[in-house]
């Protein structure tokens, strides 16, 4: 039986952390790595370095200094060209491809949802409004697409939806990424595509699960005040093919680490 290993990582600058990307490839041995926050215009993407890691197929949508997404693959794919320009901002937060996967094509989407700033109030903080609008547009898009089949969605969605996805549910209820309005919005998006939470498929909802630890913590490991901001969702027809998952927590302790760690799922196709 063939397998497909898909990893996602907010790399926080692909040029700065290209050596760490090699460590991720060696540690997880993924077939595909989806990156967010590449912070690199397409013409400056270190294409040779990425291909040298064993990923001959690369697609990217990047801009100078901010945002940016990229997909690295060991197997062929076609880049989708008709997906929306979210909130008409052209800010490089989504990249979709169609993979030449065992058993038939798989649609793969890589998202980087706006962080939303520090104040959870649309009127006082336009960044928060942008975040809510982005998720609302993605939800409407999902509804319009109809039945969701052979699809995977990954990325830094910048929302920790469950109580055990944060170090303290009570203390983070008014903190951007875990506010009730964001959680409700993400839930609507998930339901619109009938998406299955691939990582919580393996980790029960009553267990703590984090993928991000703030740079502000003096000792991130000792404090362990994390949040699960990075997600993998699969369409209902792929839920039964989920074989395993991995969260590379050790990556948060690497020198010049990203504040996010890689997340991977494996499908048996």
Image (cartoon, helix red, strand yellow):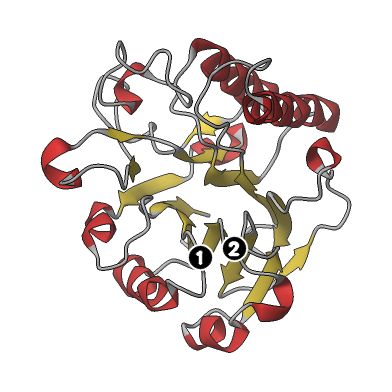
Judged left or right of residue 223, residue 191 is: right
Residue occupied by mark 2:
39
Q: Secondary structure at mark 1?
A: loop
Residue located 44% across and 21% down the image: 178
Q: CA distance from mark 1 to mark 2?
A: 5 Å
Check contact, mark 1 vs mark 2: CB within 8 A. yes
Relative to 246, residue 129 above or below: above
Residue occupied by mark 1:
13
Q: Residue furthest front?
A: 124
Say which label, 1 or 2, has the lower sequence index.
1
Q: Counting other residues with Cα less than 10 Å from the Cα at mark 2, is it few (<14), some (14-19), or many (20 or more)?
A: many
Of residue 144 and residue 241, the one placed in the foreground of this image is: 144
Relative to 10, residue 212 above or below: above
Q: Residue furthest left?
A: 222
Q: Counting other residues with Cα less than 10 Å from the Cα at mark 1, is it few (<14), some (14-19), or many (20 or more)?
A: some
Relative to 255, residue 52 above or below: below
Residue located 60% across and 46% down the image: 112
Quarter residue 238 falls in: top right
Q: Residue furthest right?
A: 82
Judged left or right of residue 65, residue 211 is: left
Q: Secondary structure at mark 2?
A: loop
């Amino acid at each position: 039986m063939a397998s497909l290993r898909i990893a996602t990582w907010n790399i926080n600058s692909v040029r700065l952390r290209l050596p760490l990307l090699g460590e991720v490839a060696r540690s997880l041995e993924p077939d595909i790595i989806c990156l967010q926050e590449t912070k690199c215009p397409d013409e400056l993407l270190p294409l040779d370095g990425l291909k040298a890691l064993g990923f001959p197929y690369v697609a990217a949508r990047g801009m100078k200094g901010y945002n940016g997404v990229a997909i690295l693959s060991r197997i062929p794919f076609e880049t989708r060209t008709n997906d929306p320009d979210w909130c008409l901002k052209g800010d490089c937060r989504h990249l979709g491809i169609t993979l030449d996967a065992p058993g038939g094509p798989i649609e793969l989407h890589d998202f980087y949802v706006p962080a939303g700033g520090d104040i959870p109030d649309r009127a006082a903080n336009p960044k928060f409004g942008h975040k809510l609008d982005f998720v609302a547009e993605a939800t409407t898009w999902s509804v319009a697409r109809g039945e969701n089949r052979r699809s995977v969605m990954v990325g830094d969605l910048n929302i920790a939806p469950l109580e055990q996805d944060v170090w303290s549910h009570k203390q983070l209820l008014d903190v951007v990424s875990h506010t009730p309005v964001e959680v409700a919005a993400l839930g609507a998006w998930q339901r619109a595509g009938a998406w299955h939470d691939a990582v919580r498929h393996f980790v029960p909802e009553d267990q703590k699960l984090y993928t991000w630890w703030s740079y502000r913590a003096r000792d991130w490991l000792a404090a362990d005040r994390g949040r699960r901001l990075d997600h993998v969702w699969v369409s209902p027809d792929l839920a039964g093919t989920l074989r395993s998952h991995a969260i590379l927590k050790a990556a948060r302790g690497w020198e010049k680490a990203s504040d996010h760690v890689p997340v991977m799922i494996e499908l048996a196709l």
